[in-house]
Image (cartoon, helix red, strand yellow):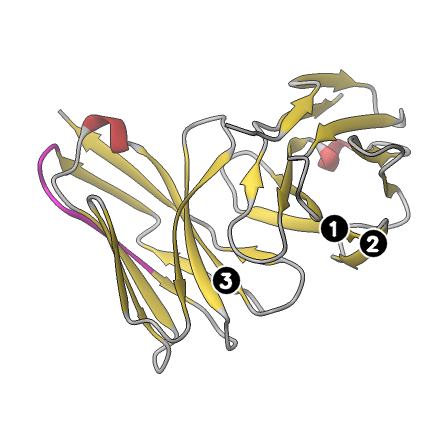
Amino acid sequence: SQQGEEDPQALSIQEGENATMNCSYKTSINNLQWYRQNSGRGLVHLILIRSNEREKHSGRLRVTLDTSKKSSSLLITASRAADTASYFCATDSGAQKLVFGQGTRLTINP
Amino acid sequence: EPEVTQTPSHQVTQMGQEVILRCVPISNHLYFYWYRQILGQKVEFLVSFYNNEISEKSEIFDDQFSVERPDGSNFTLKIRSTKLEDSAMYFCASRVLTGELFFGEGSRLTVL
């Protein structure tokens, strides 16, 4: 079964607006992580939220986790052109690997 | 800041040829991974490696694939006989034990 399905697949907003991306997953998790990928580059870790946490902040990033609904959201506030990238959620179920979703392609228009 | 390094950045090969992709994980990390990403698609798990052996592998990681940590630093992915569908970005990643993965910049493999 596929873990970490992001929604929407693509999102285009104006600079300064907030961007919200969602992630749903299927099995129980130890933690959920969000990564960013600039075009043609490697993935960069943004934030990790544990299964016993409901919300976490890091700078302009806010992540929520609802384990009853098996879903998470990533909010980027006051978006900048430099935030243009793909964003992936990844679930850690205590096995060896992280399972990544399809990603959300975020475009910030100046 | 320590980083995961991968070579080559881009490799073009003929179908049926062997390819070796190389990675130098972060030195104090214990878990090592290979993921791949077909253009514009999701990041797919291939294999994890711990304590000098494969700890988990996916269905994609068939007999054509192998991994090795020949010395204390390098971590390699070998594809014995490449197919067209092996064309993708291959990412190496490592982590201490749990928590975040640190990714390299990837090796783009093009199979003709």
The numbered disc on residue B54 is: 2
Amino acid type shown at disc 3: Thr
The kind of secondary structure element at disc 1 is strand
Distance of label 1 from label 2 (alpha carbons): 7 Å
Q: Amino acid type of disc 1?
A: Val
Chain letter for mark 1: B
Name the spot of residue B42 as percent of width and height, x first: 52, 46
Residue under circle 1?
A: B47
Left or right of A56: which side holds A46?
A: right
- The boundaries of the magenta stretch are A15-22
Residue under label 3, please give it: A91
Q: Is residue B40 left or right of residue B45?
A: left
The span from disc 3 to disc 1 (Cα, nearest Å) is 16 Å
- Residue at figure coordinates x 39%, y 75% from the top left: A70
Q: Quadrant of residue A63?
A: bottom left
User: Label 1: few (<14), some or many (≥20) within 10 Å?
Assistant: many
Q: Is residue A16 magenta?
A: yes
> CB atoms at circles 1 and 2 under 8 Å apart?
yes
